[in-house]
Amino acid sequence: MSFIEDNLSSDEEILYKADVSWFVYLNALAWLTAAIIFYVVCRFELSITSPGILLFSLLIVLIALVRFGEAFTHQYFTEIGITSKRMVAKFGFIARETMEIPLNRIESVIIDQSVIERITCCGTVAIHGTGQTMAPVKFIDEPVRFRNELNEAIAAFKANHASIT
């Protein structure tokens, strides 16, 4: 079970869960590509046979592997969702950070997307509540859909609580 499912109250339901995009791996892929290009150019185009070329290429591959690990950790252990009462986010595995903002306390949702992120339908989402700010969540898949789902949940929450009072 996920963190969000484990922490629902009895009359609360999950309305939407956001995913972390595959785009989170782009940095690692860039390092890996750089290692391959460096080795191929030095070894085959420039005919350098020094073992230092291989060692330096392996160092760059090691950096790429660390970046893949960081990206996987971010993708696998980040949860962000909307329930019928609040927006919930959890970051991290061993060192965990959680954030919960009641729907009636959310003031704004900010979406930050570069051109390439718009093309790949991912971006950074930051949710601001009264008196608190959520740290930006990077590489959220379909951030505009997340904002729209959040706005619908807020509207439904206000409509349900307006009819009660």
Image: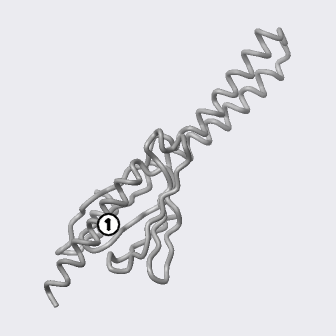
For image coordinates 41% across by 65% down, the residue present is 89
Depth check: give the residue in front, 155 or 89. 155
Using a 10 Å C-alpha cutoff, classify the residue at mark 1 as few (fewer than 14 neighbours), some (14 to 19) or many (20 or more). some
**The N terminus is located in which quarter?**
bottom left
Count of numbered marks = 1
**Image location (x, y in percent) of residue 106:** 39, 75
Residue 138 in sight from this viewpoint: yes
Residue 92 in sight from this viewpoint: no
Q: Does residue 73 appear left or right of residue 145 in this picture? A: right
The image quadrant that residue 57 belongs to is top right
Secondary element under disc 1, as helix, strand or loop, is helix
Depth check: give the residue in front, 28 or 147. 147
Dot 1 corresponds to which residue? 151
Depicted 122 relative to depicted 55: above or below = below
Residue lying at the far bottom in this picture: please name it: 165
Q: Does residue 116 appear left or right of residue 1 in this picture? A: right
Q: How is the image coloured?
A: one colour
Residue lying at the far left in this picture: please name it: 163
Q: Does residue 123 appear left or right of residue 50 in this picture? A: left
Depicted 73 relative to depicted 147: above or below = above
**Image location (x, y in percent) of residue 118:** 48, 44
Depth check: give the residue in front, 16 or 99. 16
**The C terminus is located in which quarter?**
bottom left
Depth check: give the residue in front, 52 or 30. 30
The image quadrant that residue 14 belongs to is bottom left
**Image location (x, y in percent) of residue 68:** 56, 39
The amino acid type found where label 1 is placed reads Asn
**Image location (x, y in percent) of residue 114:** 56, 47
For image coordinates 50% across by 41% down, the residue present is 23
